[in-house]
Each structure stands twice: as structure tokens, then as C-alpha cells.
Amino acid sequence: MTSRGQVVAKAAIITVPPSIIACEFLRFHPPLWEKLDAAHALPLGLADKVFLRIDEAAELPQGTRLFGAIDRVATGSYHLRPFGRPIIEGYFGGQFARELEQQGEGSFVRFAIDQITALLGRDMRKRLHPLAESAWGGDPFARGSYSYAKVGQADARAALAESVDNKLFFAGEACSRRDFSTAHGAYRTGIEAAKQILRALAPPGKHRSLGAH
């Protein structure tokens, strides 16, 4: 049942982050306790980004990493001119990223411009222009960035990925045993889940032709 009514299907792929399963924002009936346990074992960390356009970009080295500070965690790190583009990509993680999110929209931009200006000179302030920033912790459909396994609970990834009665299939980076925390891990688990559905719904005798290649 959804906010738009009931949806009926022979099978479904569940791709929500484990945080959404763990807080029961998405619920299964009857309850799937194994999935709930696996989701609790795979909480989401927080990593946010900010993108700034820079005027006269050629003056900066291409593809260079600039650390805002090395004596504290309340800092950003910055990728100057990635792939030669006239932008700076900023990274923020953990509790500090959460604190900046709580300060509201534009907080990453303000901090990044202040810090880069302090490092590279006052002239930089007028050359930096905001493009975009993320706030994954505050996204109600994510509640974080990507999963990590609690100590000793890496097997929860396999438990989360296991299908239920050949009707419910699960995908996403948290389901990947080797490529977790990556976009390609999410993509590959989605492909595998789709193949599992095709095998489950295939007429008798067709399973071999629908195997993984």
C-alpha cells in the first residue's frame, strides 16, 4: 500500500537504503525480522559535497587536493579543478557534516568559501561562486550517504541482499559484499536482482537461458 493506493506485482526490487528499513519508514507485512536486523547492522555514514565555480581557474593546479586543516576534524578537503574543469569540489564528513547541515542551506558553501579564502588569499572570495551542495543526512528518503557494517557484522550485507520467497528482491550498495559504498556496487546489485526476477518468473525450461553472464 502506498500514498497513491495499492500496487500489485508478481515481484519487486527493494532499493531503499538500510536506514529506511531500520527506522521502519518502509514496512513489510508480515514483518521481515531478518531484514530489520540486517538493516540495523548496516547504518549509514555521512559524506556531503559542495561544488564551487571558480573564475580564472587556470591559475590553480589541475586535479590537486587541498586540505582545509590537518589539526582538526571540523574541516573540508577540496579537489581543485577535477578533470580540468573550472570548479572546486569540497568534501565534508561525519559529525562536522551533520553540524553544517543543521545550520541550513548554504552552510557548506559559506564554510568552504571562508576556508579556501583563508588558505589562498582574499582575492579568492570574489572568484568563487556556489553551484550545488548536498545534505544527505536531512534527506528523509536517505538519512545518510552510504552504508558501513558494524564491527563483526559484515555478513549482514548478504542477509540484506537475500530474496524473500522469490517475490521480494533487494539491491543497493549496502547489499554488495565487495563494492559497498559505491555507485557501481548499487548498479551491479540492481542488475543481479533483475536477473533473479527473470529466473524466478521464467516459464519452466527457460531458467538456463536467463542465467547470469
Image (cartoon, helix red, strand yellow):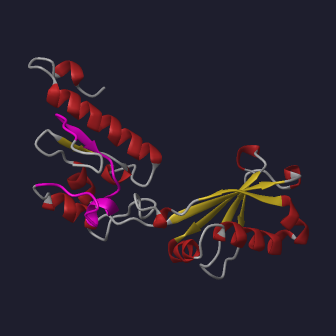
Which image quadrant is residue 91 in? Answer: bottom right
Residue drawn where x is 21% and y is 33% of the image: 197
Q: How many marks?
A: 0
- When the figure is inspected, residue 122 is found, relative to residue 164, above or below; the finding is below
**Whole-percent x and y of residue 153?**
26, 66
Residue drawn where x is 71% and y is 44% of the image: 83
Q: Quadrant of the C terminus?
A: top left
**Whole-percent x and y of residue 104?**
59, 72
Residue 179 shows in the view: yes
- When the figure is inspected, residue 67 is found, relative to residue 167, above or below; the finding is below
Residue 67 shows in the view: no
Which residue is the extreme one toward the front?
A: 4
Q: Tell whether 187 sits left or right of 70.
A: left
**Whole-percent x and y of residue 141?**
40, 57
Which residue is the extreme one toward the bottom?
A: 71
Is residue 21 magenta-colored? yes
Is residue 28 magenta-colored? yes
- When the figure is inspected, residue 45 is found, relative to residue 58, above or below; the finding is below
What type of secondary structure mainly makes up the magenta span? loop
Residue drawn where x is 27% and y is 60% of the image: 21
Query: 130 or 87: nearer the eye?
Result: 130
**Whole-percent x and y of residue 81?**
75, 51
Q: Tell whether 208 sits left or right of 193.
A: left
Residue drawn where x is 46% and y is 60% of the image: 145
Tell me where the magenta segment starts and ends, as one range.
7-29
Which image quadrant is residue 31 in? Answer: bottom left
Query: 84 or 86: nearer the eye?
Result: 86
- When the figure is inspected, residue 76 is found, relative to residue 60, above or below; the finding is below
Q: Tell whether 28 sits left or right of 184.
A: left
